[in-house]
């Protein structure tokens, strides 16, 4: 640690002693103990976060735990690149981490966002809109989005019951083979990820390669038999499939790179 940083830490320690007693239970103690707990880049991270400490006056904002997480996230970043993040990003992110400590999925999204904001090489990737996006994700949706980002292709189909005169009725929407573990909330998840601008299901667009859909359509043909629908739709003439796909939006890709990757 260089002389300038040592002097900065000394000034910080003296300043903490003058903080009003409302900070004593959590913030002051966390600051004093941080040098003992953090094994990795402790003083650098602590110093970078000091300008934000004045915002953290309540016990629920567990800055000490946040610093531990950030120490891990920034372990491979050179100390000279660790900077103070913008308050309009960092303050709500730290607040959010405090009430998502019991959800690893959401906590990691906020921590990754904050770590990127504290790295001079990646700070320009951070957009404040990402905070609102994370707030509107459930832990399951965060896991699912991470999962579909790892897939090279995401083929889906709608299943229609064909009726006379070119009419049809949809009997299954967005059927696919890659969401088996998310069936319980799949439709709501897809709608929410689309609403947030993370994914898009373009109308009339598919992968253009029939073989991509062969296994899926084979499974659906076994599941949806025409005879089982004849009682309700005696005029039905057959079952057809509309090929679709899930695309990641530009916003979704940037969100993944910043908050998940």
Image: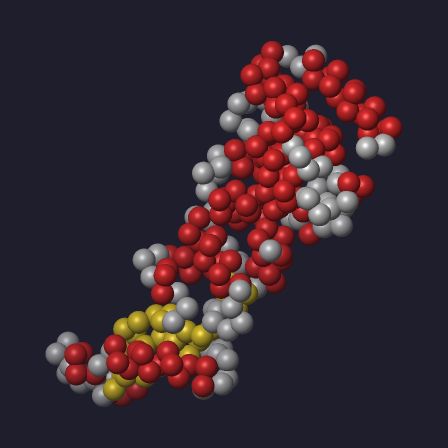
7 vs 123: above or below: above
The answer to which image quadrant residue 4 occupies is top right
Q: Position of residue 127 (x, y in %)?
A: 65, 48
Asked whether, in this view, residue 126 is left or right of residue 14, the answer is left
Question: Residue at position x 37%, y 78% from top?
Answer: 216
50 vs 84: above or below: above
Asked whether, in this view, residue 246 is left or right of residue 33, the answer is left
Q: Position of residue 220 (x, y in %)?
A: 30, 78
Q: Position of residue 91 (x, y in %)?
A: 62, 34
Question: Residue at position x 87%, y 28% from top?
Answer: 3
Q: Position of residue 255 (x, y in %)?
A: 59, 55
Question: Residue at position x 55%, y 22% from top?
Answer: 58
180 vs 128: above or below: below
10 vs 250: above or below: above
Asked whether, in this view, residue 101 is left or right of residue 68, the answer is left
Count numbered badges in the picture.
0
């Amino acid at each position: 640690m260089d002389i300038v940083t040592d002097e900065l830490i000394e000034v910080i320690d003296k300043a903490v002693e003058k903080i009003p007693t409302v900070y004593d239970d959590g913030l002051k103690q966390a600051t004093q103990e941080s040098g003992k707990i953090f094994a990795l880049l402790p003083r650098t991270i602590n110093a970078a976060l000091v300008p934000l400490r004045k915002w953290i006056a309540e016990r629920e904002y567990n800055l000490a735990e946040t610093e531990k997480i950030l120490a891990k996230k920034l372990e491979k970043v050179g100390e000279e690149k660790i900077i103070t993040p913008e308050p309009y990003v960092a303050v709500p992110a730290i607040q959010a981490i405090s009430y998502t400590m019991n959800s690893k999925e959401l906590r990691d999204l906020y921590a990754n966002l904050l770590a990127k904001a504290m790295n001079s090489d990646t700070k320009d990737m951070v957009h404040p809109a990402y905070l609102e996006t994370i707030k509107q994700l459930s832990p399951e949706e965060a896991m699912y989005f991470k999962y579909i980002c790892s897939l090279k292709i995401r083929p889906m189909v709608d299943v229609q019951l064909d009726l006379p005169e070119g009419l049809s009725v949809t009997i299954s929407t967005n059927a696919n083979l890659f969401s088996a573990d998310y069936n319980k909330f799949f439709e709501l998840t897809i709608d929410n990820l689309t609403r947030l601008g993370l994914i898009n299901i373009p109308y009339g667009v598919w992968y253009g390669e029939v073989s991509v859909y062969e296994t899926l359509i084979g499974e659906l043909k076994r599941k949806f038999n025409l005879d089982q629908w004849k009682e309700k739709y005696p005029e039905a003439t057959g079952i057809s499939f509309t090929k679709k796909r899930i695309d990641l939006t530009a916003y979704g890709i940037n969100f993944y790179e910043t908050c998940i990757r």
